[in-house]
Image (cartoon, helix red, strand yellow):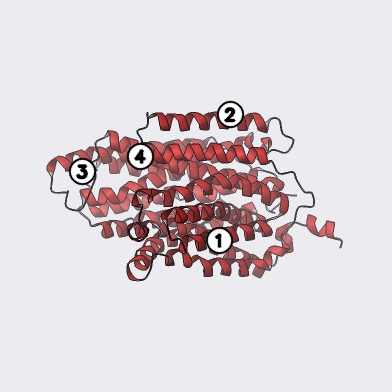
Amino acid sequence: MNVQDNNDLRPDERLGRSEKQAIVIGVLVVMLLAAIDQTIVTPAMPTIGSALGDSEYLPWIITAYLLTATASAPLYGKISDSYGRRPVIAAAVVIFLLGSVISALSPTMLTLIVGRAVQGLGGGGLLVLAQTVIGDTVPPRERAAYAGYISATWAIASLAGPLLGGFFAERWHWSLIFWVNIPLGIGALFILAGPLKKLAVPTHRHRLDFVGGLLTLAATTTLMLALTWGGGIYPWLSPVILSLLGASFILWLLFVFWLNRVEEPLIPLEVLRNPIVAAATLACFFGMGGSLAIAVYVPIYLQSHLGLSVAASGVALVAYIMGTTVGSAVIGKMVQHVPRYKYLAVGGYALAAVCLTVLALQSTTASLLLTETLLFVAGFGMGSMFPIGTVTVQNAVDYRHLGVATAVLSFMRNLGSALGVAAVGAIALASGLPGLREGTTGDAAVELATASAFRDIFLAGAVISALAALCFLALKEIPLRATVKGE
């Protein structure tokens, strides 16, 4: 058999069961690497500020990573579709590890921020490429079942990240939160090096759309800065925020104009015009926005309403995280057995909307047991987004656009997260949510203000969940392919 024939074989037919398992394990390590980095830094930030000084720039430790990770995601999708997954995912891991070393050795806050930006450049590709490689390996009909493993990886990161970050910063040295990435990254490269050689490599080299890439980076960066700074560092109607939003709008218009002119655009027009991709990515945009916004404000609610300590409120959030993990696993297993699979997501988000509505109506009287139960069930419903969103998008496009389509989905999830937190934050501010600290729960005026604010926050979460359900309802179902390429 010649090389051309070998490259044209379906990847799922060329890989044995043990090789598929090795790839999935390596991919999960890559995902853990990116996921844990988003949760491990926050608890160590006060210690980092004390050690490096310039504490007023601490938010940039998070912002720098978020900006570069979100903006670079579409680039990784296109490059991997053109040059294959193996070299691109290896490059992403190496860039991420380079950023980790720069961060760990940082003598100043500015150097640390630069290191975090480099980490984001690698991290933006890790999540996209991990899901794309699973798409290369597992047919759509079976792919949703792997969502449980992916959600479990995120759950581990959500729980272990803050614990490790606080422990390293308090007991040893804050730089360990970055050094821990090195063995994980090397382990992932070692596991993936062999099996990924057997994935199909494109036989035609595509031209890279550098202008489109620069426009995407600029448009995304200005938009994310506006969403990150708005309502916090600057008022929403300040000249800075309005200028950033205006610049982003113009840059996105230029990007659309460029896509219609260039022969091989960064994001192929057939992907953007695909109604299934449009509905699924919009559903995940709302779904991720509502999910993260609720996760941000639930600990504050538990502290103010139920009087839990900061540590205890973090532990209590486990119900929500576990609900999402279990929901993703259960619904992912059901997808291949349910012909009208979109209704699993419609029902899941409708269930989440109902739970959040009940929580809003009971915000002043809900017990810890009721709150935890409602959060678990709401998380269970929201977990449907991960298997169904990813599988429907990957199933709807040609195999040659798998990386780009997955990157667009990841980009919309990130954008939804930022916009959801910003929108709910604006609602919280408008509702009079005060700054909360331990010991404020005894003030009747504060309790009244927080009760009104949290009612509005949970209602906003319910509305966002309902919008996600409607987008999933608009999704056109097509049979899930039994092979990776569907040929």
Kindly tell me whether residue 480 is visible in this rendering: no
Amino acid found under the numbered disc labelled 3: Thr
Q: Residues within 10 Å of mark 1 (few under 14, many from 20)?
A: some
Marks 2 and 3 sit apart, C-alpha to C-alpha, by: 46 Å
Q: Is residue 427 found left or right of 191 in the rendered image? A: left
| The label number, if any, that marks residue 233 in the structure image | 4
The residue under the point 72% across, 64% down is 197
| The label number, if any, that marks residue 51 in the structure image | none
Q: Which residue is mark 2?
A: 253
Q: Relative to 17, does residue 326 appear above or below in the rendering? A: above
Q: Which residue is mark 3?
A: 364
What kind of element bears circle 3? loop
> Which badge, 2 or 1, comes first in the chain's sequence?
1
Q: Give the number of callouts.
A: 4
What kind of element bears circle 4? loop
Marks 1 and 3 sit apart, C-alpha to C-alpha, by: 48 Å
Marks 2 and 1 sit apart, C-alpha to C-alpha, by: 34 Å
**At which x and y percent is residue 384?**
48, 49
Q: Which mark lies nearer to you, 4 or 2?
A: 4
**At which x and y percent is residue 250?**
55, 28
Q: Which mark lies nearer to you, 4 or 3?
A: 4
